[in-house]
Image (cartoon, helix red, strand yellow):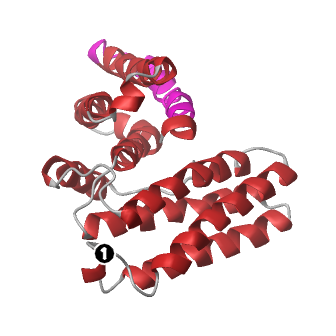
Amino acid sequence: MSNHIRTPLKALGLVATLAFASMVNAADAVTDLMQAANGPYRMALYKTNGKSQEEAQQALTQAQTMWSKLETQFAAKPAAPYDRDPAFAASVTEVSQVYQKAAKEVAAGELTNAHNTLERVRDVTADMRLRNNIVVFSDHMNAYHAQMEVVLIHGPETLVQPKGLLLLTAQTGALSYLAKQLGTQAPAVHKQNAEFGSLLKAVETSVGNVEAALLNQDAPAVKEAIGKLKGPYSKLFAKFG
């Protein structure tokens, strides 16, 4: 994950969207292909967060190839419900441009820059679904990620504000809710997967540790627990996000 930060307002907007949008699973040909492209995309994110330029290049090439299939098949004439979206073609093109930029950065050995660049794909594809009232499990992962960054990045500065413990408790409560949603909204194939259950439990535990430290009003323990939020989520996202 990068240092790209969603604002708290946008994070809360994601929560509201997921609460009220129509739930669709394998809704249409475009969403299906978008989800098929999500696996290679996650691997590209994971590899650009590492140190191997060769592995990052291979993963990025696979992600580009999958997205090119969507662009070739649907950019000019998307299937419903995206056929009513005037911004669809522009969004597809933007994702392709993001991949092109990231590829140049990987070729230059700038893996961290490429990783940060690739974060934009998650935002664009999420917005594409949002505009068309499509919600998939990835959107719940994205909502958790957005609120996690609010706590992870802004938590320490919130903690030193007047009533900082109370403010951070509220932010962590939202994160706890989103963590629970990952379990309830996961598709059946995930719920039946023991590894998914184990990784999800680690995410829930990491949030619970922050909540426990907040209840104890132990600021040093809060900071320590906040610093351990990223790892469990990253592992869950890489495999199932």
Q: What's the magenta region?
A: 215-236
Location of residue 20 with respect to 204 vertically, above or below? below
Location of residue 127 with respect to 187 vertically, above or below? below
Q: Nearer the viewer, residue 88 or 216?
A: 88
Q: Which residue, given by chain and number where applicable, does mark 1 sit on?
A: 82
Q: Amino acid at mark 1?
A: Tyr
Q: Residue furthest left?
A: 20
> Residue at 27% across / 36% down in the picture?
185
**Residue 145 place in picture, x, y as percent:** 42, 44
Q: Nearer the viewer, residue 181 or 215?
A: 181
Tell me if mark 1 has few (under 14), some (14-19) or many (20+) residues whose alpha carbon lies within 10 angstroms of its own: many
> Residue at 44% across / 36% down in the picture?
156
**Residue 108 place in picture, x, y as percent:** 85, 67
> Residue at 35% across / 18% down in the picture?
208
Residue 160 visible to the viewer = no
Give the SS element for disc 1: helix
Q: Is residue 97 left or right of residue 124?
A: right
**Residue 27 place in picture, x, y as percent:** 29, 57
Is 113 covered by the magenta stretch? no
Is 229 covered by the magenta stretch? yes
Residue 76: quadrant of the picture: bottom left
Location of residue 138 with respect to 116 vertically, above or below? above
Q: Nearer the viewer, residue 217 or 173?
A: 173
**Magenta part, dominant SS:** helix
> Residue at 79% across / 63% down in the picture?
106
